[in-house]
Image (tube, rainbow, N blue to C red):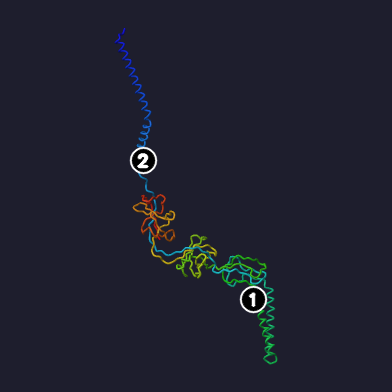
Amino acid sequence: MIGKRGASGVFRMRKSIVALGALAASAGLAYVGTTTDTGRDILARFSANEASAQAPAANERGPAAPPPVETAQARVQQSRLEIRSVGTLASDESVTLAAEVAGRVAEIRFAEGTGVQEGDVLVKLDDSLIRAELADAQARRKLAEANYARANSLSQSGIGTARARDEAVANLAIARAAEELAQVRLDKCYIRAPFSGVMGLRQVSSGAYVQAGAAIANLEKIDTLKLDFRLPENNLADVKTGQNVDVIVDALPGKTFSAQIYAIDPQVDVNGRSLRIRARMPNQEGLLRPGLFARINVIGADRGEVVVIPEAAVVPRGSEVFVFKIVDNKAVEVGVELGERRSGEVEITRGLAPGDMVIVSGHNRARDGRPVDIIAQQQRTS
């Protein structure tokens, strides 16, 4: 048998074991709770470590390469005043041929679209009736001449009276007038070219009966052409007779023609406040036609030296324009003011100096103050 002391020792040992077990269980629960509560922190530390690992790889690529651009140099050239307008070409002479007397069209002696010479008979009307009237008038004139000669002889011999002589003189004048009238009517049966030119399309056929005033065809003189155009009244001091004009016709792309101002209307059009101007231009080759639309550049006085750049360098932004100037291999945005434009170039009245380099290709990649890679420079040989 176990004594009291032995039993008490065993009891105390069991109590200690239970206490230790409870402590261990409590510690275990505490560990589990701690692990669960700090999971988010572990994920955050993991993500941060991943980002740290990737950062050096990104830094190894370095900054973006400068964008490639093409440039051109601002240069100086002589400038002259140029005034642009639009106009219309017209025949040097133009007429619509018409019958002056009524009659049947007997002959048409021209071909449409062909050249004719001044005085050529173009259309003949039936003249049989008028020829008969002319023959009658000629016979009456001869009779009147004979009567006059007889009356004049009798008057000089003292046999005839002065009255008989006067009547003979009057009758002769009437007969001659009738003959001339018949001759004129006969001549008007022949419609002639009033000047050398090119025939248009005819509006009558052979055998047709036409009234006096009926249109036959148009005749155009086109070896030289007129150019009619207008300029604003504030250009009055800039234009004068003898001034040269460059002409471009849309119907003949790539060609430039020359004209010269020969007339300026003395009256300003009060409706449009414009000057009516007429120039003359040669057309010996017959390339141009009356009625063509023309783009006009009036060449004015010299204006001295100006700075010019290619039009491709200009970048519009709203109501303003600017260019990218190259400074230390960087694109610098510079506002400019434009002048005249011509042949793919534009005058710069403010903002650039001769020799400045500007970007002409690659604006969309350039940024103000950022480096650029100049891969080519445009050269102008003329």
Chain-order first, disc 2 or disc 1: 2
Tell me the tag on residue 184.
Answer: 1
Which quadrant: the N terminus?
top left
- Looking at the image, residue 78 lies above or below residue 314: below
The amino acid type, in three-letter code, at marker 2 is Ala
Task: Give the alpha-carbon distance from disc 2 to disc 1, as whole Å.
Answer: 105 Å
Q: Which residue is mark 2?
A: 58
Q: Using residue 146 as the reference point, say whether residue 311 is left or right of it.
A: left
Circles 2 and 1, Cβ within 8 Å, touching? The answer is no
Q: Can see residue 281?
A: no
Q: Can see residue 191?
A: yes
Residue at (33% x, 16% y) in the render: 15
Residue extending farthest left: 5
Expressed as whole percent of the image width and height from the top left, the position of residue 142 reads 68, 82
Which quadrant of the view contains residue 155?
bottom right
Tag 1 secondary structure: helix
Judging depth in this view, the residue of 205 and 359 nearest the camera is 359
Say which of marks 2 and 1 sits in front: 2
Expressed as whole percent of the image width and height from the top left, the position of residue 342 reads 44, 60
Tag 2 secondary structure: helix
The amino acid type, in three-letter code, at marker 1 is Val
